[in-house]
Amino acid sequence: MAFIKETTTLIRKEFLMEWRSKYALNGILIYVFATVFICYLSFKKIDPITWNALFWIILLFTSINAIAKSFMQENRSRYLYYYTIVNPAALILSKIIYNLILMSLIAFICLFFYTVVFNNPIQDFAYYLLAVALGALSFSSMFTMVSAIASKANNNSTLMAILSFPVIVPLLMLLIKLAKNAMDGIDRASSANEIGVLLLINIIVFAVSLLLFPYIWRD
Amino acid sequence: MKIKSDWWKILGVVLVLFSLFQGLMGRVPVLPILHETIRNIYYHVPMWFAMVILFVFNAVYSIKYLSSGKEHHDNIAVEAANVGLFLGVLGLLTGMLWAKYTWGEAWSNDPKQNSAAIGMLVYLAYFVLRGSLDEAQKRAKISAVYSVFAFPVMIVLLFILPRLTDSLHPGNGGNPGFNKYDMDNQMRMVFYPAVIGWILIGVWVMQIRVRLLEITNQLLEN
């Protein structure tokens, strides 16, 4: 019970901090708009396979940029305060859930803007939304822990990219395949394997993050 | 060298020498497309087995380091990753050579080839992470966390993803597995010893490298 209360309080704190500065959300939204628009200006018209790949690449880089900040903004003295009052598992869980909410919001805005600017070749839209939601879940669960690791090393943003690319590639391959099936309107049952593996990896990543974070949160 | 504790090193050398000799001189079945390149199975496949075993060592000793904090465990983890990466590169090169003769191109966009290349990236990133941290204990702890975190993903990458898609490799996407009829009993008598031999050699190289690293560290301290 205390654990859940701690987690919800920490999530509230994250939202409050974000609301006060509005720095991360606004920055990321401008990043999304700029990237999509640059892609539009340089591609004009694209075929469906490129459409899908480009969307996921934009989403990948957006989420790396969005989530990389989640531990960098915490300064040392605030960490000292955390050590005395919170459970490390509650801290990482609150970050993952906050990033999940933030990423889902950004991903849907990105999809909306992307389909407005480019044409929309998606045939099974509801299923594509599911793929995007699973993408937001995978990115947030994977990158939160990687950003915790990267924040402990000195040169943050490059390291974040180097550490996260190899671990996200399998998920990204599954997501692109799932999204492509939805885009082509292929029978939903044929993508059940991809969804199953994605959920499995996410559960493993959640469990491993909760187990490992207590080892790195103190220097 | 004591026979009682070091017998496995001798066994490794004997098995690898046996498979090298049999690989060049032994009799192999005549199969379409593969022809004589089937001999490469004694060299290419054992590299992957040995690599996976060494990466398992890396994950296990990373967990051990996190629970014990002993520097020795970190040394084993890092050298296991080193040797595993080297075996992975050898596996990739022998595989590319084989692919050139049987599939036509060295890089044929095969899911297992791609997965293996990305799997290596995980451990290259592990070394970049280690390089970016100066303090020894912090480096050991954070890189151990990363390797334990990345290990399940690598397992998915190497063992689950290629089975979901079509692959040119045997045993994937409807292609026959190499156990079924590609390999006869005589080949198996060489293949399994080769796998065991290369695993033992890999572990031995790792052990020697750990000893070397620890002696170097001791000399640097004095």
Image (tube, coloured by chain):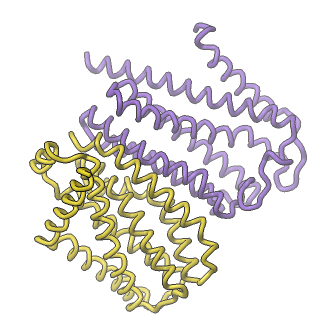
Chain colours: A yellow, B purple
Q: Residue at x 47, y 25 (%)?
A: B209
Q: Is residue A120 above or below residue B147?
A: below
Say above or below: A25 vs A145: below
Q: Residue at x 23, y 50 (%)?
A: A2
Quarter of the rendering occupied by the C terminus of chain B: top left
Up-down: is A33 above or below B174?
Answer: below
Is residue B191 found left or right of A211 in the rendered image? right
Q: Nearer the viewer, residue A10 or A47?
A: A10
Q: Quadrant of the N terminus of chain B?
A: top right
A202 relative position to B9: left or right: left
Residue at the farthest front position: A1
| Residue A33, horizontal then vertical, whole percent | 30, 82
Q: Residue at x 31, y 46 (%)?
A: A213
Q: Give the image location of residue B221, x and y in percent.
A: 26, 19
Q: Position of residue A97 (x, y in %)?
A: 31, 62
> How many marks overall?
0
Q: Residue at x 44, y 31 (%)?
A: B61
Choose top left, top right, bottom left or bottom right for residue B210. Answer: top left
> Residue B50 placed where, x, y %?
60, 36
